[in-house]
Image (cartoon, coloured by chain):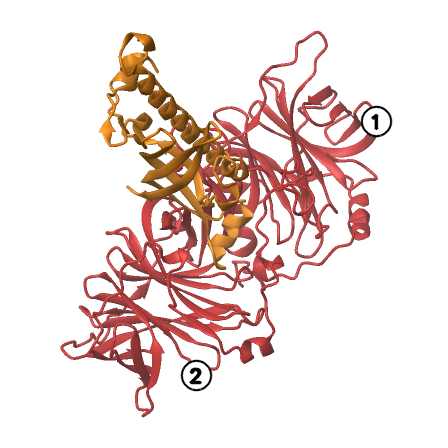
Chain colours: A red, B orange
Amino acid sequence: MQKVPYPKEQMHRIAYTKLTQQQIGTKLAANPGPTSAAPPSSALAGKTLKIVTDKGPTLGYTFAGNDRLRVAENDGAAVDAGYGAVTQGHVVLFTHLVPGTQRGYHVVVDQDTRLATVFEVWFSGFTDNREVQREIYHGYVAEPGKEPPKERHALTNRVEGKGFHWRQDNGVETLEFYPSTFYSNFVELSRQGGELGFCAPSDYVQIDDDTYIYSRVECEFSGVQTLYVFDANRVEQAGVRLGFDRNDALEYYVFTGRGEWLGQIAQFEKFGDVSVPPLPAPGAGAAGSAAPAAPQKGARRVYRPMRNNWTMTKAEVAALRKTDVFSGPNPMAGNRLPATDFLVGKQVTVRFDHGLSVDYQFPTVNRLRWRRTGQNAWHDERYEAWESAPGVIMFGHLLSSAENHDCYKIVADFDHGLATCIHGTIGSQYIANEAQADTWFGVLETAGVTPPKYRRHRFTDELVGRAITWNYSPGLTSMHLYTTPHSLSWIIFGADGAGGMEWSGPASYVKIRDGLYLAYWLEEACNGTLGTILINMRTMHDVGIGYHCSKEGVRLNAMGAHARHAGRFDIARFYDLRT
Amino acid sequence: MGTNDVSTRRRFLRVAGATLAAPAAAVAGVPAAQRPGDDARLAALEAVEAIRTLQREYARLVNAGAHAQAARLFVTPAAAAIDETVRRLAADRFAAHERIELAQGGQAATARFECTVETATPIAGRYTLVDMLRDQGEGALRTVGRRVLDSAYVKTDGAWKIARLVLLPA
């Protein structure tokens, strides 16, 4: 029997039901309160709490036991609700919905300081009703005769760069990375088999130097929220999950968990900057308004690539004739290597292991001729080539006559007679203008080179866990986090160096030489691009080729960036196949 | 900044081809009537100070993104060509290497000073990272570099205005 629960569809391919407000209301009304694998905490049983927030509600609570409470919002009429509580050290987290509404609260109280942070959460607040919305309020627990504390919990970048392996008391097991100040990356080991990592907009709140609140909402996927208090020193967590799963069932439970610290990657803010970067949420003002409007309640910056209307029909893709092949400067190649004339005048045959082989002639530095070995007709194409390491050439070109707008991106090692090709095609079973990729291993034959019979470039997990920044042009810097052997995420930096938006896609890594890796990633259900780079860890420089299909045509563009090694998480061991 | 700081600057000030004694602050405390030629000298120093003030105001407005207001500092505001990519303009070493030359008659001047210029040029094209930057409210190629602010001024109706202002490679 299969022991690893690989999903039939990965998260970015699931067509989540567009739940109506009424459907959500019905499901919430049937829910008595959060469940838990362990007996719920009785830390609040028999107590009353009045929580005052600075810019939000005042909440009055009476806890009858460990699963029922009465809540009064802003001194209004109290209502009964089911609740669940969990504790993490001196911090208690409790959660409840407000009966008759699609709203609720996750409340975090530091019992030592009386400081509180309230996450008000609600459904049906966005185009996708199922996506949990949230607003964060900081405040305190009011006690008669006591002055309100002056301090507050606050958003923080102190979590940025951390990574943990979490195992919840309900058996859920994840790898979670926080390489940004408002996004995070998670690998579902137990739910989905850990093939791919995914990203979600996230909040980070500091309670004290050990203790933080983390919250993510799986926007553009199920819309589920996962929120927990965690102790980074003791690697313990206590949290809540709220939302609708892929089968539209309500997940509403509290949990505790223990974990393992996986490492710390670099931050790139200025030294001394421990604040969260002031990247404002998008305003709610009228379009064209010069003055930034105050953000709407719950507003946050969310990357929603599939809402940009970039997809095409099969007929549109088939009719495409326009191409843009290495046509000139572009922002992704501001720091590229100069093109090499290494190939000029050479005749090369690249013989792949699956049987196909291609003959090449390179009359000039940017024009090549190719044909299938054995055929007579040559095809002329524009190409570019770069010498990343001595004797290692990366070059790429379109196959103009090919049915799927195919491209070849080839790394040829003339010192070792080896070649690997990333064969790009346009069109997946999901999106007609989305790039797909195959990896072909083989050898190259040319004058003076006798290729090996058995040795080949090979897939590797040596990059897994690493984080590498890429500065493509001034002001255009991202970081790759190689989260699994089959996926990577990319993080955009803000002007102040803080990690910002993040997204991810399927990926693959091939070892070319020691410290030299060929990587590709597919921006599936994103922008459809196939990015391919040859990473030189010695020079900390890459060369690469982007491949993209849009209504403007098929584009092959150079890439090139300066790198910095941002650190490494110890995670490759989580992906081994074990008996 | 104290007088001593000013007195150490290597400013260069000329009137109609003849170098006027510098540093400027060296005569600051001397009554005009006490030295021959001081009226002309004082007028020149006042003109230089007015031009410096104009330069500083131009930089302040450009740094604030107030390009329309900055254009009003020009003789012909409608013809003012203000580089939209400049986000910050700051004089190097407190304008220690500024060079101001007054024309004969004191009604026109040229000036050059070294400065550091930060530019932000919107990134063109559709690339995933660029799209994400735009979603973050950013999306500009940023550069920081040293330049020379080369400018010309005329006095019109008793006030100095900018006749020409360009940023040249340092």
Q: Please provide percent x and percent y for residue A546.
A: 41, 64
Q: Mark 1 lies on which chain?
A: A
**Residue at the image point whose x is 42% and y is 80% from the top:** A400
| Mark 1, residue position | A78
Percent x, y of residue A484:
43, 54
Image quadrant of residue B92?
top left
Q: Mark 2 lies on which chain?
A: A
Vertical arrangement, residue A54 with respect to residue A240, above or below: above
Residue shown at the point (22%, 76%) measured from the top left: A453
Quarter occupied by the N terminus of chain B? top left
Q: In this view, does A364 lie above or below B48?
A: below
What amino acid type is highlighted by mark number 2? Ser
The quadrant holding residue B16 is: top left
Image quarter where the C terminus of chain B lies is: top left
Residue A552 vs B60, above or below: the answer is: below
Tell me which amino acid carries mark 1: Ala
Q: Residue at the location (66% across, 9% down)? A: A147
Return the x and y of residue A180 as percentages of the image width and height.
Answer: 48, 41
